[in-house]
Image (cartoon, rainbow, N blue to C red):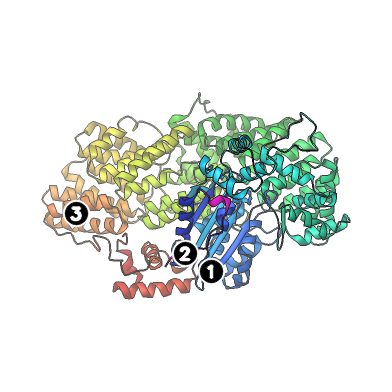
Amino acid sequence: MPTRRVLRESPALIGRPQETRRLHRLVDDLAAGRGGALLILGEAGIGKTALLESAPTPPRTTVLRACGREIDRQRDYDGLHQLCAPLLAAVTELSQPRREALEAAFRPGGDPDPFLVGTAVLGLLSDASAERPVLGVVDDAHWMDRASTRALAFAARRVRDARVAFLVAARQPGDRTELASLPSLLLTGLPEQDARRLLSQRVRAPLDRPVRDRVIAEARGNPLALLELSRTAGLPDPDTPPGAASAGTPMEASFRRRVAALPADTRRLLLVAAAEPTGNPLYLWRAVRHLGIGVEAAAPAEEAELLSVDLWIRFSHPLVRSIVWYDAAPADRRTAHRALAVAAAAQEPDRWIWHHSQSLAGPDEATARALERSASLDGVPGRAAAFLEAAARLTPDAWDRAARTLSAAGTQRDAGAHEAAERLLALACSGPLDERLTAGAETLRARMALDRGRCDTAAGLLRRAAALMSSVDASLAREVRLDELAATACAGRLATGPRPPQTADGPRRSPPPGPPRPLDLLLDGLTDRARGGVAFAAPALERALRAYLDDRDTRPYGPGEAWALCSAAVDLWDDSAWRRLADRQVRDARRPGALPTVLPAALNRRALVHVHAGEFEAAAALVREAGSLPGHTGRWGVPCVRTVLAAWRGDRSRTAGLASEARRDAVARGEGHLLTAVEYAEAVLFNGLGRPADTVRLWRSVHHLDETGLHTWGLAELVEAAARSGHPDLARAALEGVLRRTRAGSTDWALGVRLRCRALLSGDSEAGDLHQEAVRRLELSDAILHTARGRLLYGEWLRAGGYRTEARRQLQRANSVLSACGAAAFAARAARELRAAGGHNRPLRTGPADTSCLTPQELRIARLVATGATSREVGTELCLSPRTVDAHLRSVFKKMGISSRRQLHGMNLLR
């Protein structure tokens, strides 16, 4: 039943019937028990706030509100605290890790795991919605701190099956990319007819027709601009000298005149409110009392509709805050901060040092050192960078100022604020730099190029940075050199400029004193890889992997290091090491204090391991999570995982679309490694669909390349396709590549793939033994899909040779596994071969299991359990306790007529 709507007249609602209906549909869905989210976008004054306020509220609904403030952007989780404040009493009901994460988020100086914060917020909202619907209303989200918007977006994308809805208003998201994935509604200017209707309804003073036309033309359909301009249209400003023009837009000029008309004490109160980041009225009253101003000074600002005072201090529009602050004299701003420092001194030392630093007119080394100390103790990069930037401003010595500015730039980069990092880097480079600072600046510049996704460009910059760093810090120079080699390998065929010849002179010949670190061993392996290929580098890479798998190395990996490690494990065909390294990277990326840009890449690398093991649902869950995080389109080829997953599932249209998108992305970023991954994915699809000629066409011109990672997998696909489509010479050439690359690894995975490829080009006398041994070896590895494909090829060979009984046995087992994993194209190919061998298609579950009796939550749990996930792992993914997961599973078993988790493993649970 739709909610009864009682709408008050609002400027934003005139001329916006479609926008209003869409907002109300979301609220109706909430009343019906369905969740959702809507992001309302538009310029300042376009009517976002009024549209939010017009939303009806279903009966017995909990409404949560938050409003972003420009001055709070560096205060992590401030906006989230506003939103969740009415629910904080229920935090004790959350599981311990989530409770501790949320408590740390709301504690000054806390450094929680962002993922746990997101799941904690989702759990808090889900628990509250069990009693009554929950509506979250967030205004000015573009001013909200990044940590809050990340947690907000995480929750908003996952509330569809709960009685929780979000209405979020923002200008264009800008660097808040996490909001961009929400369903959006763009508000544009009112048409001229509606603008005239708004003026006639809302403006009581008569306006001459020429004045009205000018107001409409200048406002460009912006409702707030229409009303502000109409207040003073045609009226001279007595304080403006003849011929003088107001600064800024007409709307800014109108706000500026209203502020200037206030009493002096009220303007000073507004200035303190503009400098106070929390909006807490207690801080404001305490600070203005220090200035000799009483609370009654706020009344004129409230009467002028510039400020509202209740539980929070709020400006009527962000422009008002900006005008109050930027029109004030520097001395007056410092006075406001000094008053706020006095107000905060007893409660929060970090708040005190911040306001104290802003109250100083000139350099102060003692305060700069205190700010630097606060930055070192603050595990949140955004706040630490703000402290460091303030410290640099107060540093009297030019060299120290450049060093602190450079440190602030690096910390902003760690926080994912790339524009701020580039600004600070340019500022640091404008000062005096010694050899060490020059090397540090060049290293930061190179790594920011890598952040922007230009592996080809970054490789050259990293090479130069490593050369500069080698004379001041040999250990750090080796880290930069490793990033350079990783970027070069990632660029692959798209590398630009000449590559420097590899010689014995360089970091490898001058290791740091003492025992080599795991990173040093990896660098040696990558250097050997660049010199002589995978086979030549295998011993060094093997030593590096063993060192990294030693639990004594607990430091977090750098981005290039993490990518190179997993690539080394793949080059050595060591799927056990690959899985362990990917698991550790995800654990490290989820830890408190981890850089926000690390997790998306780690999740995608772990997802690819899941694909290798035939765990498609687990892989898809990680890919979805990675896609919901900021930075998910970043470095190191992570977009390839979606394409590979779609290809293994046999989804033609999705694979084609993702492959096209990934190719454009690869060329734009100079990332040849991604092209290789896309070509491998398409080869998998074509071979599954029984179109080997398409694989031959795709790989004929690239099989000779010597690239790391997935290139060897593509060669194995080419051996099969060329052998099946009558291209023996190409098949033998590809086989040589496979044999050369698999010699680098002595694992069962490597031996199984090598034997399988040899079997395809061997005579009947030995092909059967090779196929049989290939299947045996692959069964000993984690390569579930490759084991099933080995059985498929063996069964095809047996059927062609007339061994129909054994062929049916191999094909039946292949079909069962491929169907259970969701590899639809290969399962269909196995089913066709099985029928041709006289068998019947009886996989464990050939088609999708009947899940119509399951609730959406039960279906999600069943899918994850079918991949082998434990109740604790399912609970972490879905923000449920293990006990709740087990209760849902009992319901699943009863409805589906099964009695154990093992029976779920063989089912295709896709609807």
User: What residue would you read off at disc 2?
Assistant: 30
Q: Nearer the viewer, mark 1 or mark 3?
A: 1
Q: Identify which amino acid the numbered label 1 is placed on.
A: Thr
600 in magenta: no
Q: Which residue is mark 1?
A: 61
Q: Tell me the quadrant of the picture where the N terminus can be found.
A: bottom left
Q: Position of residue 133 (x, y in %)?
A: 50, 68
The Cα atoms of the two marked residues, 1 and 3, are separated by: 53 Å
Residue at the location (52% across, 54% down)? 586
Q: CA distance from mark 2 to mark 3?
A: 45 Å
Distance between mark 2 and mark 1 Cα atoms: 9 Å
Contact check, label 2 and label 1, Cβ < 8 Å: yes
Q: Secondary structure at mark 1?
A: loop
Residue, disc 3: 831
Disc 3 element? helix
Give the amino acid type for the residue marked by disc 3 in the picture: Ala
Q: Is residue 6 magenta?
A: yes
Tell me the magenta residue range.
1-14
For marks 2 and 1, the one nearer the N-term is: 2
Drawn side of residue 311 relative to residue 826, left or right: right
